[in-house]
Image (tube, rainbow, N blue to C red):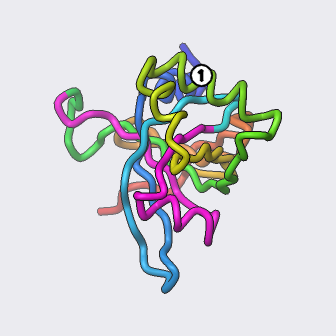
Amino acid sequence: MPTPAETIREFLSGQRSLILSTLDGSGLPHTSYAPFAAHDERFCLFISDAALHTRHLRERPDCSALFIEDEAEAAQIFARRRVMLQCRAECIARDDARFGPRIAAMRERFGGIVAMLEGLQDFHLFELTPRCGEAVFGFGDAYTIEHPFDRITPKRTGHQR
């Protein structure tokens, strides 16, 4: 039987995009999505200045990422498998040594579209570093997460009647 950490890693490896929650300049929440590639248990996004979330991440780098099972695949709509992570975003400049391996992970995962987007100067590479979060894999099957994914604790609060 896989450990909770193995279950989380396997679930995340099957996801191609994440739901991103950011805060605008007034502190109001904004939710969007972005394709991602994992790199060293961090999540790389290649996003445009045209998207509000890009500006939000530059101004307020704290964000939340949600990875959630597709509704069509969920056995129970009230218990969709999901991982929610509180993250800190960092924009990685094109001349930074870290840019190459991270954009290569994006290219490997998404192919030619990334190479085409690299030619557009309004696209920027952001890396989300998880701090903590939670995972839910069914009723009563929930965990708190501390990053890296080596400290995963079952949630003891449960359903009350």
Queried whether the magenta region covers residue 58, the answer comes back as: yes
- Viewport quadrant of the C terminus: bottom left
Residue placed at 65% from the left, 44% from the top? 127
**73 sits left or right of 37 in the view:** left
Residue 89 appears at what percent x and percent y?
A: 65, 54
Side of 53 relative to 38 (left or right): left
Establish if 16 lies above or below 77: above
Count of numbered circles in the view: 1
Q: Quadrant of residue 31?
A: bottom left
Q: Quadrant of the N terminus?
A: top right
Q: Residue at x 61, y 43 (%)?
A: 125
Residue 61 among magenta residues: yes
Q: Amino acid at mark 1?
A: Glu
Residue range of the region highlighted in magenta in the rendering: 43-72
Q: Write down the quadrant of residue 34 in the picture.
A: top left
Residue 42 in the image: above or below residue 26 = above
Secondary element type, mark 1: helix
- In this view, the residue farthest toward the bottom is 26
Q: Residue at x 21, y 30 (%)?
A: 75
Q: Residue furthest left?
A: 72
Q: Position of residue 130 (x, y in %)?
A: 66, 47
Other residues around mark 1 within 10 Å, as few (<14) / some (14–19) / many (≥20)? few
Front residue (pair 45, 132): 45
Residue at the disc numbered 1 = 6
- The x and y percentages for residue 57 are 58, 62
Residue under the point 64% across and 43% down: 153
